[in-house]
Structure formats: C-alpha cells, structure tokens
Image (cartoon, rainbow, N blue to C red):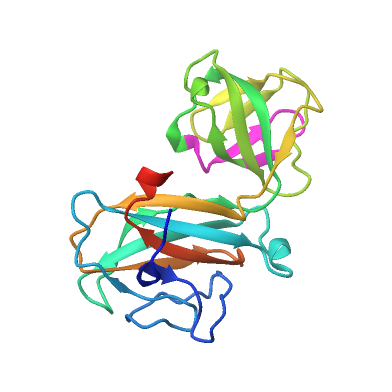
Amino acid sequence: MAFDALGILKGLGSGGALVSIDEADVAAIALAVNADGNKVIDISKTGVKGLAAVMVLLGFGAGESAAFINTDKAVVTIEASDDLVANWGTIATFPTLYGANQLEFYVTATTGFVQADIGLLITQETTADTGYLTYFDPALAVIGGVGLIRVQPVDSGDVFNEAAGKTITSAGTGAGTKTYGAGTTVAVPSDIPGVYVVRFATDKKYVRCNCAGVLDAIGTGWILLNDNAFVTI
C-alpha cells in the first residue's frame, strides 16, 4: 500500500527523528507536529467507505523490551473531533499488544469460551500457572472443541507446561483440559515489531492518534492514514 506524507498521524518528532512510543507520549492538539511526532489531520470527514489507520512498529530500542514486561499491555487508539483542542472521542482501536513470551498450547473445551474471556486470567491445574488469555481458536466456543489458546504469562515462572488432561480454567466462562502433555507448550514471537490496520469512518473534521494506553515503551514506529489499504492487502 502507498502512503502520502500528508497522512502521517505519528512519525518524525519536531527534532527530526522518530520518538519512542511510550506512556509519556503526548497526543496532538494542533495541525503542526509536536515533540513526540504526533499531529492532527484535517480530513473533513471520511465518507461512507472510511479510511484505514496503519500502525507500523519497527521494534524495541535499547532496553525497551526489558521494560515492557509480561503484564504490560499497549493500546493505541484513533480519535476524532470537530475541535482541535477538545472533545476528542475514540473511533477505532488497534489490537491490544502484549509483551514478549506469550505461550500457545492446545485445549479441549469442557465449557465453551466466549469473547469476554479475552484479557481475563487463565489458571492451570496443579502448577497454578496463571496468564492472560489473548486468543482462543473459535473451535473452543463449543464443548468438545479442540483448539489453540494463547496466554500472556503473569511472570516468568508461569510456563503452562503441565501434563495432558489437566484443567485450564478462565476467570470468565471458558474451561477445558490440556490436550497434549509437557513439552508441547511453545513460545510465540512478541507482537512487536509488526504492522496493524484498523478501519474507521467519521463525520468529524479532525483525527489524531492517542498512545496514552501504552505501558512502558514499545519502540519507534509510524501511524499513518490510507484510503485503499483494504483493497491492497
């Protein structure tokens, strides 16, 4: 997909370099770029087809991956308003990003998982390993379904490497038993770096990004607008 320089919501800071995306990131309230590389874009509404916001994360900087620990989450939103400095409201949210060391393993559902289980604690029988559920295979919505789940461990000791048949319980609705035994739980790559796309439509005049929901630093990156991302990818 092609990008236009006029569609940059976050990029080079006022100092001429990319600025780390972190909890201190200041959202824009002007059409000019601020010190954190954020600016407001006047789109004069999107039209019915909407626009795509694309977040390109380039990776952790020195020491940042260590700071972004297991329990941290990073939420980046797109906001719209008819006023440059006030009345901003969220119109789109990028997928929640988690720290490194997510784990994947197979479960057989004994109680169907539901969407509300995402983000809640999962506990494994015997070892009492705990982690936040970040994904479950749709097959697990049905009792007897077999599928992959992904968890974000609470700490480094939560390895979810128990024997087959042990109970996996959500703090919400879903529950199941581990399908395969010790040695079958695998680590998956961090969500960073990566490219994330959300679509939105608004009749508001201005849009901006807001990185206030980022805990610790997730490296540098770009947040851009595009009108044909869903045709291209």
Q: State which region is magenta.
A: 117-131
Residue at screen point 41% across, 69% down: 8
Residue at screen point 68% across, 68% down: 61
Closer-to-camera residue (136/33): 33
Closer-to-camera residue (53/146): 53
Quick check: is 119 in the magenta stretch?
yes
Closer-to-camera residue (158/102): 102
**Residue lying farthest to the front in this orientation:** 2
x%, y% of residue 9? 40, 69
x%, y% of residue 103? 69, 38
Placement of 3 over or under 167, stated as above or below: below
The quarter in which the C terminus is drawn is: top left
Placement of 40 over or under 137, stated as above or below: below
Placement of 116 over or under 30, stated as above or below: above
**Residue lying farthest to the bottom in this orientation:** 15
Quick check: is 23 in the magenta stretch?
no
